[in-house]
C-alpha cells in the first residue's frame, strides 16, 4: 500500500546500536542522483527504521561521473545522520538506470522500499513507485519531500532514441501484419496476428526497460 508522507520530522529519535546489524529486514531507500536538501527526509527515514526495527540500505543509480559524485555525497551525509541516530546503514551506488532490477537484487520479503513522490522513470516519465509496485511484491512508502532541483539538462538524444525505437517497433509490426493478411486466412491468420501482437508488446516493454 502506498503511504504519502506529509508529517514533519521529529527531532527526537530512539536509537539502537550502530555496530549491530539488528533484526532481519531492511528499509531500502532509493535516492535520486540530483541535488536536493534531504535533511527532513533523512529524519523521516530514521523514524521509519526505528519504528519497524529495520536496518537502512541506501540505493542509488547513476549514469555519469557527475551523478555518481552527487549520489555518493548524498549517501555519505544521510548515512552519517543514520549513524548518529544509532541505525545500522549500508549504501549501494549502482551504474545503470533499471530500478526494478536494482531493488530486486537487494530486497527480500521482510523489506520495505522508500522512494520519493517526484522520482520518475522511462521515456513516459512514470512514477517510480507505480513501476515498482507493478513489477515487484514489496511494500512501497512514498516521501512527498523534497522538491528536487532541476539542475540537469533534458537528455534530448536519449528521448529521441527512445521514441524512435517505439515508432520503429510499432511501424514494423504494423507493416508485417498488413503484408501477412492476404497470405493467410482462418485460424492461421488469427494465430499469426496474436503471436505478432504478443511479440510487439514484449519488444515495446523490453525497449522501455532500457530507458527506465
Image (cartoon, rainbow, N blue to C red):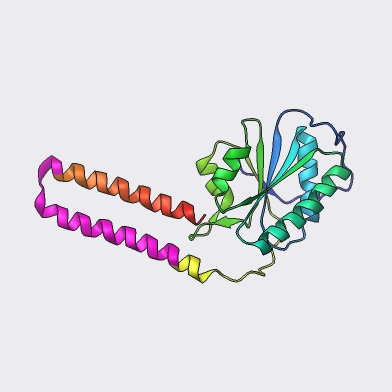
The quarter holding residue 20 reads top right
At horizontal 20% and vertical 42% (from top left) the residue drawn is: 191
Q: Residue at x 18, y 44 (%)?
A: 190
Q: Where is residue 35 in the image (x, y as percent from the top left)?
A: 72, 63
The majority secondary structure of the magenta stretch comes to helix
Which quadrant, please, contains the N terminus?
top right
Examine the structure image and report whether residue 167 is included in the region drawn in magenta: yes
- Total numbered circles: 0
> Which region shows up in magenta?
161-188
Give the residue at the far front of this rendering: 65
Q: Which of 40 and 30 is in front in this view?
A: 30
Residue 32 x, y percent position in the rendering: 66, 56
Residue 110 placement (x, y as % from top left): 65, 30
Residue drawn at the location 20% of the way across and 54% of the way down: 177
Q: Quadrant of residue 91?
A: top right
Horizontal side of 86 relative to 58 (left or right) equals right
Q: Would you say residue 159 is visible in this rendering? A: yes
Amino acid at each position: 500500500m502506498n503511504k504519502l508522507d506529509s508529517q514533519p520530522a521529529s527531532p527526537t529519535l530512539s536509537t539502537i546500536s550502530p555496530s549491530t546489524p539488528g533484526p532481519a529486514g531492511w528499509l531500502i531507500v532509493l535516492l535520486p542522483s540530483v541535488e536536493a536538501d534531504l535533511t527532513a527526509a533523512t529524519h523521516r527515514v530514521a523514524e521509519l527504521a526505528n519504528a519497524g526495527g529495520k536496518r537502512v540500505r541506501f540505493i542509488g543509480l547513476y549514469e555519469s561521473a557527475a551523478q555518481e559524485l552527487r549520489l555518493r555525497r548524498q549517501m555519505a551525509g544521510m548515512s552519517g545522520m543514520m549513524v548518529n541516530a544509532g541505525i545500522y546503514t549500508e549504501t549501494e551506488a549502482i551504474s545503470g538506470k533499471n530500478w526494478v532490477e536494482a531493488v530486486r537484487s537487494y530486497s527480500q520479503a521482510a523489506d520495505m522500499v522508500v522512494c520519493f513522490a517526484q522520482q520518475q522513470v522511462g521515456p513516459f516519465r512514470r512514477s517510480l513507485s507505480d513501476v515498482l509496485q507493478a513489477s515487484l511484491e514489496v511494500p512501497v512508502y512514498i516521501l512527498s519531500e523534497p522538491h528536487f532541483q532541476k539542475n540537469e539538462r533534458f537528455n534530448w538524444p536519449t528521448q529521441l532514441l527512445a521514441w524512435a525505437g517505439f515508432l520503429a517497433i510499432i511501424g514494423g509490426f504494423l507493416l508485417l501484419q498488413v503484408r501477412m493478411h492476404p497470405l493467410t486466412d482462418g485460424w492461421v491468420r488469427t494465430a499469426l496476428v496474436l503471436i505478432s501482437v504478443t511479440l510487439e508488446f514484449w519488444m515495446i516493454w523490453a525497449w522501455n526497460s532500457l530507458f527506465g
